[in-house]
Image: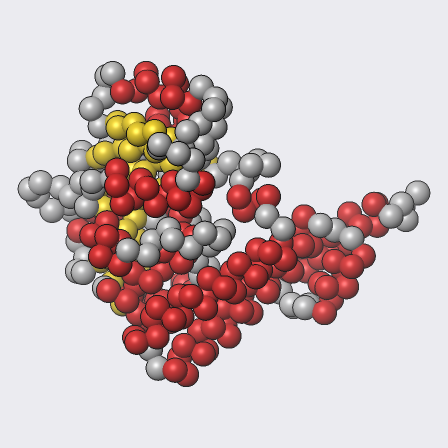
Amino acid sequence: MMRKGVLPKVTIMIPTYNQELFIVDAIQSALAQDYENLEIVISDDISSDNTEEIVQQFLNDNSRVKYYKNAQNLGRVGNYHKVLYEYATGDWVVNLDGDDYYTDPTFISRAMNRILNQKDIVCYFGLNYVPKKLKAYKTQLIDTDCYVFDGRFYLKHYFDIGGFYHLVTLYKREIALTDNKCYTFKGLQSDFHGIIRYCVYGNVIVAKEDKYVWRIHDKNASHSMDYKNKLEDELLCQNLIAEDIKDYYSANETKQWLQKGEKWAKNDYVSSMLNRCPKPSTLILGLIHLRLNKNYIIIYIKSLILTLFRVNLFR
């Protein structure tokens, strides 16, 4: 049960840039949330389309919605930083990009209910599925597909347990203000770099949250980056995090964390290449880094078939 009294304010941050085709869905899904103490902050990075005009319809009739237009274009991560540190006023925050939206109006209230009924929670990490390794922690189960961990334990075993999805991850804004590093890493992993370090400050909840739409299109940062650059970006991010958290772990624990992180990043790189860049050289890369698990084998076979079609071997 949710604790009685004044509920903590939650800010749904909506950074946007030239997303006139999508922004209505994002705002409407935020407004549909049934959590009582809610603030919706839209940070427009000087869109050149009709975003500002579209947003106006939501400002006249609802005091929960606030709209800000940056004085200059700050870029994706800069806009994230601006809305968190200067525009948001909530006790807890979550980032919903302007081209994504929620499909469950109870997401915020469910997450906050779980947060308020546990001790010293600093982050609520949403996953779109429950990894098998996470299911092994039955003693940490507090609700259906929902687990609570000591934050330092979770961070230490992050690459074993599984990651989180930015748009369904809530965290304490006070910690972000004190830490002052959230959304300062300019690479693709800006959310991972900014949020995961908060684990050292308390306990965390890890829960299945899959009622959302993450739109995939050619302007997604994660789908427009060169995969080799993405790999280098991930490894740099991990090293920066390791430097920040080194006082909380032994030198050996930090080394092991980086080794697991490097393996995870390289596996992700190979899978991404097989999925999106099927060709002979990619197949060779896949064989070099062969993993004997069902999902990987399926990805490899699909890449093999697509490659054969592309080189006209089926003609």
**Where residue 123 sits: x, y (%)?**
28, 55
Above or below, 65 relative to 288: above
Front-most of residues 110 and 158: 158
Above or below, 70 relative to 191: above
Residue at the limit of the structure toward the left, as seen here = 5
261 left or right of 271 in image: left
Front-most of residues 179 and 312: 179
Residue at image point 72% right, 69% down? 288
273 left or right of 68 in image: right
119 left or right of 287 in image: left
**Where residue 68 sits: x, y (%)?**
30, 29
Visible residue check, residue 186? yes
Residue at image point 19% right, 46% down? 91
- On the image, which quarter does residue 138 sit in? bottom left
Front-most of residues 67 and 284: 67
Residue at image point 78% right, 59% down? 281
Image quarter of the C terminus: top right
Front-most of residues 89 and 117: 89
**Where residue 301 sits: x, y (%)?**
74, 55
Residue at image point 20% right, 52% down? 174
**Where residue 205 sits: x, y (%)?**
29, 57
Q: Tally the marks.
A: 0
130 left or right of 223 in image: left
Residue at the limit of the structure toward the front, as seen here = 72
